Every structure is written in C-alpha cells, then in structure tokens.
C-alpha cells in the first residue's frame, strides 16, 4: 500500500514538471521570418484611349443663297489656301457693278469740271462738295457690290485635304447647306482624357507616347493645351497634343492608345504585400526592434503583384516581420529564424 502511494506521488510530481516545461516553451520568443526594407523601382502604368484629330477642320458653307454655276471640288485632293471651290450665280450683281462703274466715270468727270470752275469762282464751294460727295458715294457702292460678289465665291480657308462634296452643279445652296469639308491632315493632334487624380501631373510641353491599332510602332506627341475644367461626366481632364513627326500611317479620326506612367519612382521604399496589416483606420507593419515586436503606422502608395510602396513609417534598412503576424502582440518577444 505504501508503495502505491509513493508511486502515485512520483507520477504527479513528474506531470507537474512536464507542464512547467511546456509553459516555459510557450512563453519563449516566437520564431518568425524577417525582411530588410530596401528601395526599388515602382510605377503605375496606364493606357488611356485617345483620338487623332486633324490640325484644322471645318465644314464649307456659303455666306449667301444662290445657284451653283461652277464646281471645282476634286474629292480627296489637297488644295491651297484661297483656291476657288464653288462659284454661285452673280449675273445680277455683275450688271449692277458695271452700271455703277459707268456712273462713277460720269461723276468723276463732273467733279473735275466743277473743280476747274471753282478755281475761277464759276460755282460755289457747296456745288463742288456735292459733286465730290457723289463720287465717293458711288465708290462706296462699288466696294459693297464687290464684297457681295466675293461672297458668291467659296474658297479654301487654309491648305488642306478636301472631303466628299454634297452638291452638284446647278444645285441651289443656302448658308445652312454643307458643301464639303476641308481638313489639314499634314499635321495631326492627339486628344485624350486624364483621370482626375493625375491632372496635376500634366504640364504644357510634356512628351506623350502613343500607338495605334494594328501597329506596334510608337509615336510621340507634345502637350500644348488642357481643358480649363474637369469633365463632370467622365471625371477626367481633356488634353490635346501635337503629334511629332506625323507619317502616312496616321489617319485623322483613328483610335490611339496613350501610354502614361504617372507614378514612376526608381527609389521607392518597398515591402512585401503580405507584411501589411490592414486596420480600421490605416495600415501597420510589425518592426523587429531588438527582439521586440513594434507595431508602426505606415502610409502606402502604389501596389504591384508582390510589393507595396511605403511612403512613410519605415525606412530602408529596417527589419520587418512577414510571417506569424496574426499571432504577434505589441511588444511581444520574437526571434528571427530567417532574414530575407
């Protein structure tokens, strides 16, 4: 009986000793993986849709109504500034002009005679002034008629390429009739929209790279203007660029793919994505500080498939923890099993 009691006491003492050793193991430092913070290159590339536009483009309209008597539009050809495209009927205006030119000749001769008579006091100054005024009135009427005749001639406003014509000889046109279009395609513009958060990073003179569908060739364009406000519908800022070194493969109206990289940074502080601890009001990293876990608030930037940019909170050379994050408490003892 005494032997049984002694054996039971020994077992109980052994169990207590084993439990105490287990508690000691649980209270020891947790083994974790560390990572030394370093710098690297980070970027946020975007591909924005754009459109190629002619440098100048306008619809051709007549200032006055009339019948087309001459049509000099060769569709799809280039024309020079001032080239005659359409001629409207001006027979009545021409007849009035000839009549006024005859009246001007008579009035000028009358004014010359009255001028000689005035020298010998043959007429009064008032009579001469009336004849001089008559000459000037006729001249003004002639200039007005010439202006009206010029309105019957529709000419190219700039060097450009003519589109399809919408009228034929003999047609009656009005100022609302679209006769044709003319585009200046020797120089092209590129228009695209930049998301609102990147508007501050667009500046005049900035060089933009773009490509077109069906071609891998890269083209360059230079920003020359931005819209004054952000679009309420797209929440973007419209940007216009002048295409540098345009070639025949670029066509006005074509779709363009604009390559932008607004956040490129070759010296960004980077940490692995799994090291970030999301919080209700921010994000944290666990910093290894002499065997103690220190939780620090960080501000993150760009994220890629493996790393996250840290804007503030840690610096290059710091050691952070990448494993066992859910089991670590603030100021807990930890040890590094491996450092990356």
Image: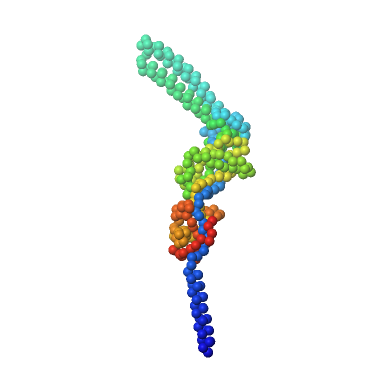
Q: Is residue 21 visible?
A: yes
Q: Is residue 280 among the parts visible in the rendering?
A: no
In the image, residue 135 sits, relative to residue 82, either above or below, namely: above
Colouring rule applied to residues:
rainbow
Q: Residue at x 54, y 36 (%)?
A: 55
Q: Nearer the viewer, residue 165 or 163?
A: 163
Q: Quadrant of residue 161?
A: top right
Residue 6 % position (x, y): 51, 85
Q: Position of residue 265 (x, y in %)?
A: 50, 47
Q: Which quadrant holds the C terminus?
A: bottom right
Task: Say which of 135 and 188 sits in front.
Answer: 188
At horizontal 63% and vertical 42% (from top left) the residue drawn is 215
The quarter of the displayed image where residue 220 is located: top right
The number of numbered discs placed on residues in the rendered structure image is: 0
Front in this rendered view, residue 200 or 274: 274
Of residues 110 and 158, which is closer to you in this image?
A: 158
Q: State the residue lying farthest toward the top.
A: 120
Q: Estimate the x, y position of residue 75 in percent, counting from the top left.
A: 62, 34
Q: Position of residue 165 (x, y in %)?
A: 60, 36
């Amino acid at each position: 009986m005494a032997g049984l009691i002694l054996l039971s006491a020994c077992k109980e003492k052994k169990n207590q000793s084993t439990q105490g050793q287990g508690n000691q193991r649980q209270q020891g430092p947790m083994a974790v993986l560390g990572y030394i913070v370093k710098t690297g290159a980070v970027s946020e590339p975007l591909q924005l849709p754009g459109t190629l536009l002619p440098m100048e483009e306008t619809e051709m309209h007549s200032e006055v109504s009339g019948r087309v008597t001459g049509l000099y539009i060769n569709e799809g050809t280039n024309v020079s500034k001032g080239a005659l495209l359409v001629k409207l009927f001006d027979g009545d205006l021409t007849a009035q002009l000839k009549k006024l030119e005859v009246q001007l000749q008579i009035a000028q001769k009358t004014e010359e005679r009255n001028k000689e008579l005035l020298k010998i006091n043959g007429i009064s100054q008032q009579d001469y002034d009336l004849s001089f005024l008559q000459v000037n009135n006729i001249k003004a009427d002639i200039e007005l008629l010439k202006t009206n005749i010029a309105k019957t001639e529709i000419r190219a406003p700039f060097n450009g390429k003519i589109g399809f014509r919408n009228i034929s000889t003999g047609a009656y046109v009005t100022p609302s009739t679209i006769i044709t279009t003319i585009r200046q395609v020797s120089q092209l513009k590129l228009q695209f929209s930049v998301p609102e958060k990147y508007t501050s990073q667009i500046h005049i003179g900035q060089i933009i790279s773009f490509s077109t569908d069906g071609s891998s060739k890269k083209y360059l364009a230079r920003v020359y203007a931005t819209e004054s406000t952000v679009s309420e519908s797209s929440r973007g800022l419209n940007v216009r660029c002048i295409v540098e070194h345009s070639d025949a493969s670029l066509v006005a109206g074509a779709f363009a793919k604009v390559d932008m990289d607004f956040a490129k940074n070759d010296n960004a502080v980077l940490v692995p994505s799994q090291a970030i601890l999301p919080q209700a009001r921010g994000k944290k990293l666990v910093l290894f500080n002499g065997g103690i876990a220190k939780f620090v608030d960080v501000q993150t930037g760009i994220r890629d498939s493996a790393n996250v940019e840290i804007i503030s909170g840690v610096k290059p050379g710091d050691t952070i923890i990448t494993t066992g994050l859910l089991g670590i408490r603030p100021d807990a003892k930890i040890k590094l099993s491996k450092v990356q």
